[in-house]
Image (cartoon, rainbow, N blue to C red):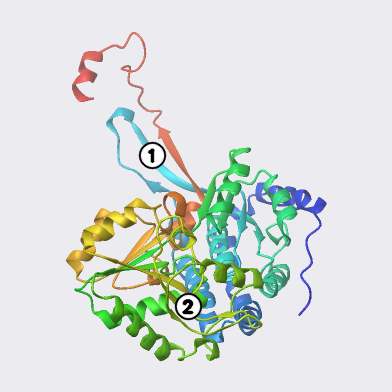
Amino acid sequence: MNALKFSPIPQIAELFNQQKQFFASGKTRQPDFRIQMLHKLKAAIAAHQQDIEQALFSDLGKSAQEAFLTEIAMVNLEIDYHLKHLRKWSKPQSVSFSLSTFPSRAYVQHEPLGVVLIMAPWNYPFQLLINPLIGAISAGNCAVLKPSPMAPATAILVEKIIQANFPPEFISVVQGDIPENQALLEQRFDLIFFTGSTRVGKLIMQAAAKNLTPVVLELGGKSPAIISKSANFHLAVRRIVWGKLVNSGQTCVAPDYVILERGLKSQFIEAFKTEMENLYAANPIESNWYPRLISESHYHRLESLLTNATLLFESPRNKDRLQFGPVLVDMPPAGHPLAEEELFGPILPILELDSMEDAITYVNQGEKPLALYFFGSESEGNHVVNQTSSGGACINETIVHLANHHLPFGGVGQSGMGAYHGRESFTIFSHKRAVLKGAVWLDLPFRYPPFKYFHWLKRFL
């Protein structure tokens, strides 16, 4: 594999200015151009599918099947959805008649923002870079892509694909780390779309504030999975195991911890081991379907989280291969990193509480998570969802809500701001411009001094 070459910092401002000039030409405003570019992107992905799968295996040890399902297929489906609806979304949308502005007509026009910056993380390095790009293209913007250097194989391949198919003044890739990020954030982008940690998200927002640049922050948090005694228990555990262990837990919407109604703990531990073995193996790191961690530092971070923790189940791990087997632990008291930090790995704390009301109270005491999962009766699930707040929620499922293009995907509070996927992606990369067309055939005297016939106007307003 070729080494990742960082972009020259002096060229970043020049690239940004080139994109500004290209956007000013008006070419991206045309729906035909956007549709053509989306078709081109889809064709390029199809031509490089095996290369993408190999890059994801190189970076994270993902199987071709997992790479396709969680990265490539999601991108393809998103492109198809935009191609189907883009023309309709781009048309002016008439709004209702308003007596206070009679006689006039009004509509809302979605117009592109301009030049946008998309900064992606390493855990889904293809999907989380290209999925926002689809919305940016669909809405008519130019885009600078910033992949994560921690997934170098994917970053190199994405740059190759973009350079071969799009002019740099329309879409380009900047490679690098902190200095390059800082140089990018000095430019006056029209939107910054960032996916990553809450800590870095705060730095992005701080930098954006200098130019009053709007931001979309897709962050994370401690997403709970709650199991009631009314649940289909083994199905609940199977879906939690899958949701937790896909990409070895390196997923922003993975169940971060489990709340069990009291009396289910021992049953959960045994069911977890059984379902883990059914999906992977008694020793998951020997399975071809179990990815590795991104780096040695992340491996050591997860090991350090287990300090002073009560282990309930521990499967083998291998530092040389960066493979970390699943671990179940008792939820420690407040203040311990396991109770406070997003784990982002295959460690799953367990907490037993007496009732669903206690579970609601516990969830609401923390920051609002990116996702919440409830397993049990629909009536109980509705109650839990209605009494809590999270970016998204599932009843008797995990993770799959983000695959529905009709649902917005995003966080709330510390788990992020702004949402995308499907039409939401088109909307978030657009400005909703209000346009009113006044009539010239009639000019009512009510609004002008000396406000003639004003007493009649007051009867209608």
Cα distance in 3D space between marks 1 and 2: 48 Å
At which x and y percent is residue 452?
29, 11
Q: x%, y% of residue 87? A: 47, 60
Where's residue 442, x and y in %? 35, 25
Residue 429 seen anywhere in this rendered image of the structure:
no
Crowdedness of circle 1 by 10 Å Cα count: few (<14), some, many (20+)? some
Front in this rendered view, residue 321 or 431? 321
Residue drawn at (42%, 67%) of the image: 256
Circle on res. 106 = 1
Find residue 118 and name its label: none
The image position of residue 243, as x and y in percent, is: 41, 75
Q: How many marks?
A: 2
Give whichever of 6, 132 is nearer the camera. Answer: 6
Point 34% across, 18% down: residue: 447
Pointer 2 residue: 246
Left or right, 315 with reference to 175: left
